Image (tube, grey):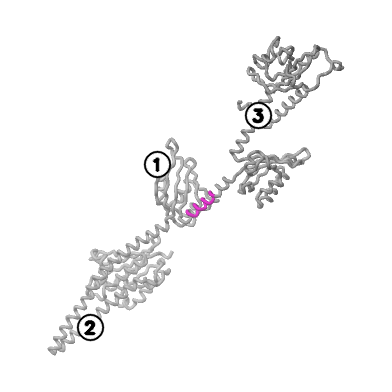
């Protein structure tokens, strides 16, 4: 049947009820006893014929020879002219009489109802009723009454199809329906509802008490409360409840219902549906558990997942993505433009190129980028992503993961620094070993040589030679003691135990000059300290030693005939401070700019000292994360020592 001819289930039921009432009236009329001839209600033959023609049913008379003697209008319309036609020919399309014909059958009842019959040519279906009568001569004849039940049969077929479709749809969707008649208390269930409860419709009669007995105790009160509230508000309601099936298993039903009332507002019935959502609830539970597991895994690994809709530019982030970026999911909406603004300026161009690369490539892509958090901190992220394309190859979505590798990058940086420091210390240790063995060997050779001379002078009684040898042995011992003391001091510098603190450079420089006041006054030196120097974060006593060494060297290596002049200055450079100590002394040949920071390196052997002072300065600066270098071009006078230190802010 075309879709526009389909009728609702309620319409089919109403139509079926109307047709059944009509058929029942006709059948009741045909079952009445014949009116006696002497009845005052007897009619002339012509009037009876008109009355039979007016009936909306098929009426005909058949004699004992099976010949049709009378046919009303409906019979003519359906079967045509009945003149001299046999009933079995006209009504059933047979060439021989019917076996169940009551004519000549003494045991046949006065009234006989045949099975339904469908005319093959028209498709019309009739329910045939027959009654055996007698004519004036006592011969039998049969009155046939045929009620057209074609529409009734069609409606019943449509209703059965509708019910079958309805039941199949409920079965497939696991949705049952119910109808609760409030005045009578009767509850009607659909087949699927019985299946949900695992009950047999033949042995179980649904009513409220029986249904509540099969409801989980924790859900009984809540379900009744929701129903009462919905009834009071005259609004549809919905609730979930767990029920026990006949086999003891537990199922979860989601019910929706609505109520109907009479004109006075009295509740007449509650109708609703029950949907078995057990599997979907289980899937939801497993999905929640899976999401929680994924979220915990992402949180522990600092890995977030995301996707971008290329058409809208909007993104979807996992919880860990918000934590990585330090953003609130309730107030922050990720978009391409906003995220680019978070990227470190040095990485922004690369991040923009990423999207172009993903557009052109069908392969996964990995990159690193730094981002700023709202608190100003910088995080380093490793991003792995790939594009998803439609059937035409157009990019529609980018999916990926983001790993916060800030701690890993910091550990790698520290590792590289440690490796570099170890390599430097190994090289320094090699130089140190060589230098120490060389410089300590010289006093020992001196000692051994003069001990031999001393023996000779003693044997010869040369007092003057003995005294000279003893003086030289004593000087060599003092030299060795001084070298060992300086080396011990250098080793202690490498084990900095004093914590760093903010130290104003101008204050520390003045303190160093004060400790060297005697030397400054003796050399008539001019020491200038720039005003308002920045503060540095250092170990105070160690930095004081740096200034002392550099100022003392400036006085020691003053140019001939020149009054020593020392200038101390400093400037900020990002997170560091660059300090400068400038003099007008002898100057340093460019070939020795690096060598002077080594152990026991002295450009002028005649000057006092061991040549370890600048090595100590170099070590102290390095321990503070800085570096030192010198600018000088001997034979031009003057040298400037620059060194960096961490700023105190």
The mark nearer the N terminus, 3 or 2, is 3
Give the CA distance from mark 2 to mark 1: 83 Å
In which quadrant is the N terminus drawn? top right
Q: In this view, does 628 lie to the left or right of 301?
A: left
* Residue bearing mark 3: 7
Closer to us: mark 1 or mark 3? 3
Closer to us: mark 2 or mark 1? 1
Residue 362's disc is 1
Q: Which residue lies furthest to the top in this view?
A: 84
In the image shown, does 625 or 51 lie closer to the viewer? 51
In the image shown, does 158 or 521 lie closer to the viewer? 158
How many numbered discs, if any? Answer: 3
**Does 33 appear above or below 288?**
above
Please give the name of the residue rendered at 72% of the width and 20% of the height, measured from the top-left corner: 146
Mark 3 vs 2: CB contact within 8 A: no
Q: Is residue 504 left or right of residue 556?
A: right
In the image shown, does 573 or 162 lie closer to the viewer? 162
Q: Residues within 10 Å of mark 2 (few under 14, many from 20)?
A: few
**Does 75 appear above or below 370?**
above
Q: What element carries label 1?
A: loop
* Residue bearing mark 2: 474
Q: Does the magenta stretch include residue 289?
A: yes
């Amino acid at each position: 049947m075309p879709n526009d001819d389909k009728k609702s289930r309620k319409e089919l039921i109403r139509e079926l009820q109307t047709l059944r009432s009509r058929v029942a009236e006709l059948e009741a009329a045909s079952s009445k006893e014949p009116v006696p001839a002497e009845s005052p209600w007897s009619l002339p033959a012509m009037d009876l014929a008109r009355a039979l023609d007016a009936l909306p049913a098929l009426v005909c008379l058949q004699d004992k020879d099976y010949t049709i003697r009378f046919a009303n209008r409906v019979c003519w319309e359906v079967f045509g002219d009945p003149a001299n036609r046999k009933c079995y020919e006209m009504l059933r399309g047979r060439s021989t009489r019917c076996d169940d014909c009551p004519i000549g059958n003494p045991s046949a009842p006065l009234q006989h109802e045949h099975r339904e019959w469908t005319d093959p040519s028209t498709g019309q279906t009739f329910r045939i009723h027959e009654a055996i009568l007698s004519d004036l001569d006592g011969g039998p004849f049969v009155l046939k009454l045929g009620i057209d039940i074609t529409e009734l049969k069609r409606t019943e077929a449509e209703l059965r199809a509708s019910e079958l479709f309805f039941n199949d749809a409920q079965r497939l969707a696991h949705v049952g329906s119910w109808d609760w008649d409030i005045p009578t208390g009767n509850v009607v269930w659909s087949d699927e509802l019985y299946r949900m409860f695992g009950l047999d419709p033949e042995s179980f009669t649904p009513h409220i008490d029986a249904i509540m007995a099969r409801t989980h105790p924790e859900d009984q009160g809540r379900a009744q409360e929701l129903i009462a509230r919905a009834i009071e508000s005259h609004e549809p309601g919905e609730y979930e409840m767990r029920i026990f099936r006949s086999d003891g298993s537990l199922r979860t039903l989601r019910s929706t219902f609505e109520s109907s009332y009479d004109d006075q507002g009295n509740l007449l019935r509650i109708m609703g549906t029950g949907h078995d959502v057990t599997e979907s609830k289980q899937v939801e539970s497993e999905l929640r558990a899976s999401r929680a597991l994924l979220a915990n895994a992402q949180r522990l690994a600092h890995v977030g997942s995301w996707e971008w809709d290329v058409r809208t530019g909007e993104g979807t982030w996992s919880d860990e993505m918000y934590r990585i970026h330090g953003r609130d999911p309730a107030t922050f909406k990720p978009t391409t433009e906003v995220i680019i603004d978070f990227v470190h300026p040095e990485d922004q161009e690369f991040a923009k190129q990423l999207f172009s690369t993903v557009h052109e490539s069908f392969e996964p892509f990995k990159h690193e980028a730094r981002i700023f958090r709202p608190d100003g901190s910088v995080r380093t992220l490793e991003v792995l992503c790939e594009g998803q394309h439609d059937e035409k190859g157009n990019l529609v979505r980018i999916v990926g993961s983001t790993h916060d590798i800030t701690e890993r990058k910091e550990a790698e940086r520290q590792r590289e620094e440690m490796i570099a420091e170890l390599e430097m210390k190994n090289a320094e240790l090699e130089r140190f070993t060589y230098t120490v063995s060389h410089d300590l060997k010289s006093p020992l050779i001196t000692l051994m040589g003069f001990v031999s001379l001393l023996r000779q002078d003693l044997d010869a009684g040369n007092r003057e030679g003995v005294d000279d040898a003893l003086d030289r042995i004593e000087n060599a011992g003092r030299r060795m003691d001084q070298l060992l003391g300086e080396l011990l001091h250098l080793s202690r510098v490498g084990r900095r135990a004093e914590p760093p603190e903010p130290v104003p450079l101008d204050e520390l420089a003045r303190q160093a000059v004060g400790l060297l006041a005697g030397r400054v006054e003796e050399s008539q030196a001019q020491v200038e300290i720039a005003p308002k120097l920045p503060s540095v974060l250092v170990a105070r006593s160690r930095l004081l030693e740096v200034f002392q060494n550099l100022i003392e060297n400036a006085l020691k290596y003053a140019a001939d005939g020149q009054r020593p002049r020392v200038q101390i200055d400093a400037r900020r450079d990002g997170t560091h401070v660059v300090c400068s100590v400038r003099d007008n002394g002898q100057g340093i040949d460019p070939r020795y700019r690096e060598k002077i920071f080594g152990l026991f390196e002295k450009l002028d052997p005649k000057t006092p000292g061991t040549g370890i002072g600048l090595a100590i300065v170099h070590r102290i600066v390095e321990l503070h994360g800085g570096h030192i270098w010198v600018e000088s071009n001997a034979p031009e006078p003057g040298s400037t020592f620059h060194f960096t230190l961490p700023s105190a802010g």
